[in-house]
Image (tube, grey):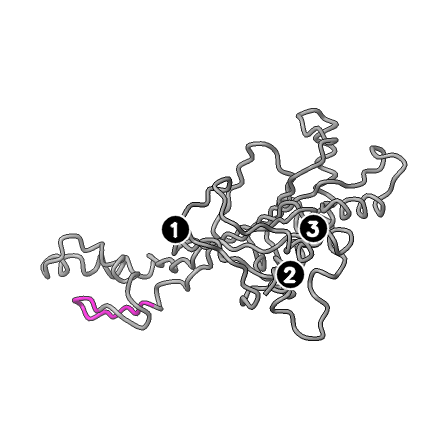
Amino acid sequence: RSRRAAAMAGMEDGKEPWGMKGLAGEDPVSWISRAPMIDLERSSQFGEVEGGRDIFPIYDHPLSSDGAPVWEVEDEGDVRVYAAPMSHSVPCVGYMVEEEQKPGRLRPELVEPVVRRNFKALKEAGMRAPMKVMQMIKDLPDGESFTFPDGTVIHQEDVVEPPRDGRKVVICGDTADSRAMDNLAANADVVIHEATNTYLAGVDKDTNMKFVTKDAIMHGHSTPQMAGNFARRVGAKRLVLNHFSSRYKGDQTLDSMSIMMRIEKQAIKASGLPPERVAAAWDMMVLPLPQE
């Protein structure tokens, strides 16, 4: 089939295709209209080599949103990478990086007293390092138990917390609409989203928020409010804004820092996140991402 037909595959009959809903300006610059122009031939320019793995869009992927395809970019066992199309003036994708589920933590206060009470008996039974029993209990399969020399039985599920979800990072680069990432980004630990332009009273003259938003969308970009709305919609825990217009200097002057704070406040209001969980990025920024 033609590339355009392939791009339209997976759409349900009678439904308006995902790319026809007023994305980056008009339909001609939406991802689905540009799909026929994407060159799928192998190119060394992008590091592609003979024998490499081809990555094709999956239109019926369980994580697809609104009929858009998903690419399974990488799966290293403990980390998976997915991509979905962004709405921009050239073909562009957003990424989701997700860790595998983490084992639950052992509750040592429930196990250590029993181990110490049986320490001597465990050594006499041939165990050189009796405290290692704690790790053995943590690693037991669900439903299994360990019996100590004094008859105490400890069940794995009673002393090990439930598994923890791995961390999820979502990166939405150049885009005027990130809806294709909705399912991929659900409950993300952090969303990194572009916020190219906005309207700031007292800074911008002869314009308003409505015009700036329309202009940003026409050029395939977003505002802090759009980034915040996306973060709210997907239930993100944190939001980092980046890709600011060059008219924002982003230096250490008071004026520049004040502008970035105002941009953050716009995203805070739109996202509903607390202020400490929204940040305008700066060069070489490091963001610790704790396991929650």
Local packing at callout 2 (Cα closer than 10 Å; few below 14, some 14-19, many 20+) is: some
Which residue of the protein is positioned furthest toward the front in this rendering? Answer: 1
Residue located 16% across and 66% down the image: 149
Q: Earlier in the sequence, mark 3 or mark 1?
A: 1
Vertical order, 66 against 31 (above or below): below
In which quadrant of the rendered view does residue 235 lie? bottom right
Residue 292 visible in image: no
The residue at which mark 1 appears reads as 51
Which residue of the protein is positioned furthest toward the top in this rendering? Answer: 253
Q: Secondary structure at mark 1?
A: loop
Residue located 36% across and 63% down the image: 160
Residue located 31% across and 73% down the image: 143
Quarter occupied by the N terminus: bottom right
- How far from the left and from the top, in percent, is residue 262? 74, 38
Rounded to the nearest angstrom, the CA distance separating label 2 from label 3 is 32 Å
- How far from the left and from the top, in percent, is residue 106? 35, 58
Q: Earlier in the sequence, mark 1 or mark 2?
A: 2
Residue located 53% across and 50% down the image: 169
The residue at which mark 2 appears reads as 4
Rounded to the nearest angstrom, the CA distance separating label 3 from label 1 is 42 Å
The residue at which mark 3 appears reads as 228
> In the rendered structure, which segment of residues is drawn in magenta?
147-156
Rounded to the nearest angstrom, the CA distance separating label 1 from label 2 is 27 Å
